[in-house]
Image (cartoon, grey):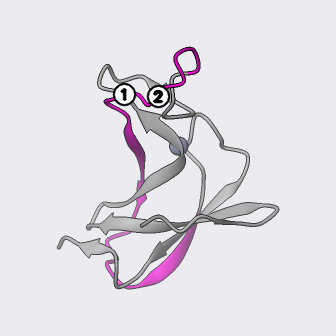
Amino acid sequence: MTIHHEDANNIYVQATLVDRIHIHYECPFCWKLKNGRIVDNPFNKKTKRLYMSATPNKHFHGSAGDLSNRTEHRLSHCLVNSEKGVFIVINENTKKLN
Ligand SMILES: [Zn+2]
């Protein structure tokens, strides 16, 4: 489950996975379609229907080889909403791949 707490400058998200290279999280702002397109809403604006292939898009940030529980601050990679920084929460709900 994505933490989606937000303050004036940052959003807070749940890390889904951490490995020696990356921290992964599902972005609360963008979805990926089967054709690879990134959209800002899982609903088709014309038909008002849910895109069948929409899945939460994942963003990746460097983990510095650290699998421990912590909160990491990063600048957002999001193409839809990058105005705020991101606090990525790595905790007991984060899958850890050594
Ligand atoms: Zn995003």
**What residue sits 37% from the left and 34% below the top?**
54
**What residue sits 33% from the left and 74% below the top?**
94
Q: Is residue 70 left or right of residue 19?
A: right
Q: Is residue 48 magenta?
A: yes
> Could you tell me residue 44's position as x and y percent?
51, 22
Asked if residue 76 is positioned above or below residue 42 in the image, the reply reads: below
Q: Is residue 44 left or right of residue 62?
A: right
Asked if residue 48 is positioned above or below residue 8 in the image, the reply reads: above
Q: Residues within 10 Å of mark 2 (few under 14, many from 20)?
A: some
Query: Label 2's element?
Result: strand
Q: Quadrant of the N terminus?
A: bottom left
Residue behind mark 1: 33
Q: How many numbered marks have been drawn onto this rendered protein structure?
A: 2
Magenta residues? 45-73
Q: Furthest-right residue in view?
A: 8
> Could you tell me residue 46's position as x and y percent?
57, 14
Q: Are marks 1 and 2 in contact (CB under 8 Å)?
A: yes
Query: Label 1's element?
Result: loop
Q: Which mark is residue 47?
A: none
Residue behind mark 2: 38
Q: Furthest-top residue in view?
A: 46
Asked if the residue at label 2 sits under 8 Å from ligand 1, the reply is yes
Asked if the residue at label 1 sits under 8 Å from ligand 1, the reply is no
